[in-house]
Amino acid sequence: MAVRLPLGFEIAGVTAGLKASGKPDLGLVYSPYPLAWALTSTDNLVKAPCVSRNRSRYTSRAAVRGIVVNSGNANCATGERGIWDNEDMAGAVAAALALARVQDMLTASTGVIGEPLPVDRIRQAVPALTGALGDDSGAFADAILTTDTAPKQVAATVDGGGRILGIAKGSGMIHPNMATMLAFILTDVDVSQDALRAMWPGIVERTFNQITVDGDTSTNDMAIVLSSRQLAADVHAFADALEEVAGKLARKIARDGEGAEHLLSVRVTGARTGPEARDAARTVAGSALVKTAVHGADPNWGRILAAIGRSSAISDLANLRIALQGVTVYQGVARPFDRQALSERLRAEEILIEVDLAAGESVGEAWGCDLSPAYVRINADYTT
Amino acid sequence: MAVRLPLGFEIAGVTAGLKASGKPDLGLVYSPYPLAWALTSTDNLVKAPCVSRNRSRYTSRAAVRGIVVNSGNANCATGERGIWDNEDMAGAVAAALALARVQDMLTASTGVIGEPLPVDRIRQAVPALTGALGDDSGAFADAILTTDTAPKQVAATVDGGGRILGIAKGSGMIHPNMATMLAFILTDVDVSQDALRAMWPGIVERTFNQITVDGDTSTNDMAIVLSSRQLAADVHAFADALEEVAGKLARKIARDGEGAEHLLSVRVTGARTGPEARDAARTVAGSALVKTAVHGADPNWGRILAAIGRSSAISDLANLRIALQGVTVYQGVARPFDRQALSERLRAEEILIEVDLAAGESVGEAWGCDLSPAYVRINADYTT
């Protein structure tokens, strides 16, 4: 996929030999300019060294120059060695690019937990990696994948010519807050670091934190936005475009959930508060029983109702409404519907569940996927 | 299975025609004596009428005379009609037994949500049901099953000759607090209602609330203990025996989780508090990635570590220890182990995961099962 890069970025992806499959596994985003940046990362108590290192850099508020990402190995739970291996990965790239400080290069790793990172292979691949720097965002998008079935890129433009390009990987261990998910969003819009950091957590809250594949959260997740600040634009227009890119990436990740055949969108209206709306939507999207029903094209709205009931949202049960693919199946009581026809409509690639809690004015959305036998097969056999 | 009933109880199970399979679906526990009782029931905001009715009776603190249970239909989300149908079910049995008050008969329903209860069939079956009252606990155990593959009975005796008999059903929508799970525990031990109600929530907290199959919680769950108070016994010995029965039933439910091939036991030590230990154990037992790894006999301890990290438990990560089937695989860092040999040991029917959080003295246990393609098949096709 050819996507025009925002100004002030170079990008690359190569094969370092970390994956048994021999697929690309080392990616790099680089800028000759100091980059304004914003970060959200995993809440898991167990954090990979890349997450801790980026967080520490984040606190310093200094600009960065890029990020090096490997797939095939999470370099997590690898002890003190993992910390030095992570530092080595950054150092090798910083040296090849003649950066003033190794700290200017961020890191990210994704893959199996608990295996030592073969950092020698990464070091050996760094000359090829920096040599490949150019405008092929697809090579980077390929290099960060693990069990994803497709690369994930989303682009948008902002009035005035500014660009936003988002690149992400899923696809298991996906759950709020921040799943085994990496998202890198590049922009040339001139937004200040303060403004970027002010808008980013809210955008992540409504997008990446609203997708769930299996309820497991990872040790390595991060979503980063990097700006080269080359082109002026209205900050509100930029924020809207950034949220659009993040939302589309989030839905791509959910759609490509391990073993998934359907994208499941849950729209909750009538909640007392936004957090209650989002929690209700997430609980429905994350329910194993709802997910298996979607897989079976089964209009089993009782499971949706039960999931809402165990969420934190207060609802008016006498007026609560549930619709599947636009067909109201419950409103205080069961509504008659053509089960056969609705089951047919549940075979669509995108499934929409709408819930009106009838308790207020707030809305929220979440995205997930069906739970299939393929999910089990993929995960029953990941390391051995 | 022939189990001697505690004194002062009669029991029955018959076929009322609520299940398409034609299997038994209507059960009754009855006592000629006023029964002391204790109840825990679902926290789901959406509650079936049977749950609300029993709770209301519970608040009155009056004794009861028994409970009528149907399977094949949860009579939940069935509107006002569901309330009257539930009342009718109790009324038909109370009339047949010539009880002074219909409120003396508790109710429980389990099965599909949102379909009207065919209460006429239940009414027609009540003479056969009350006529069948006797000592065949197996007939009752069969009549309360849904997707369970086996009936679940556990018996214990208390010094002095007192008996405890527990009968339960699983097996999907199993999660704290109180899953699609019904548990009825009968005893002839003379324990006061106050003592029973004081000990029961703690026992449930450590047993039924520590099992998880799929993270979904139901609208109909309850665990009830009924005492005919015929035989004297030490109250502490009774509490121990009651916890043993509840724990064994809980493990039977987890082992019979939908599609499960393994019972997964998680023992957490070294936690700062009991609730943290239990939460960590539950989080590991409930992780889709841990469950699929167990299904695949894959010693993927990184997923266990990641699950602990997203639980509420504080741990000392440098000293945290993980053992699989008695083999230490992680202690601050990865420990070498024979992957092939351990994978073989993970093919056992019971899988033990031990985690030492190295942060305190508290312990906790949880039980679950593997996640298999069969779970998906069972649930993708439950109503249609």
Image (spheres, coloured by chain):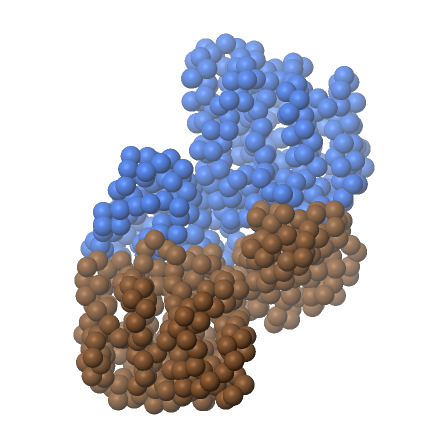
Chain colours: A blue, B brown
Q: Quadrant of residue A89?
A: top right
| Residue B326 visible in the current orientation | yes
**The C terminus of chain B lies in which quarter of the figure?**
bottom left
Is residue A24 visible from the viewing direction of this image? no
Image quadrant in which you'd find residue B67: bottom left
Residue B339 x, y percent position in the rendering: 74, 60
The reply, left or right, for residue B135 in relation to residue B56 is: right
Q: Is residue A332 above or below residue B133?
A: above
Spot occupied by residue B63 in the image (x, y as percentages of width and height)? 31, 75
At horizontal 67% and vertical 25% (from top left) the residue drawn is: A57
At horizontal 45% and vertical 55% (from top left) the residue drawn is A288
In the image, residue A19 lies at what x, y percent? 70, 44
Residue at the (22%, 63%) spot, across then down? B82
Does residue A33 appear to the left or right of A311 in the view shown?
A: right
**Relative to A33, A336 lies left or right:** left
Counting from the top left corner in percent of width and height, residue A168 is at 55, 34
Give me the residue at 74% from left, 29% from top. Answer: A90
Question: In the rendered picture of this protein, how many numbered marks are placed on residues?
Answer: 0
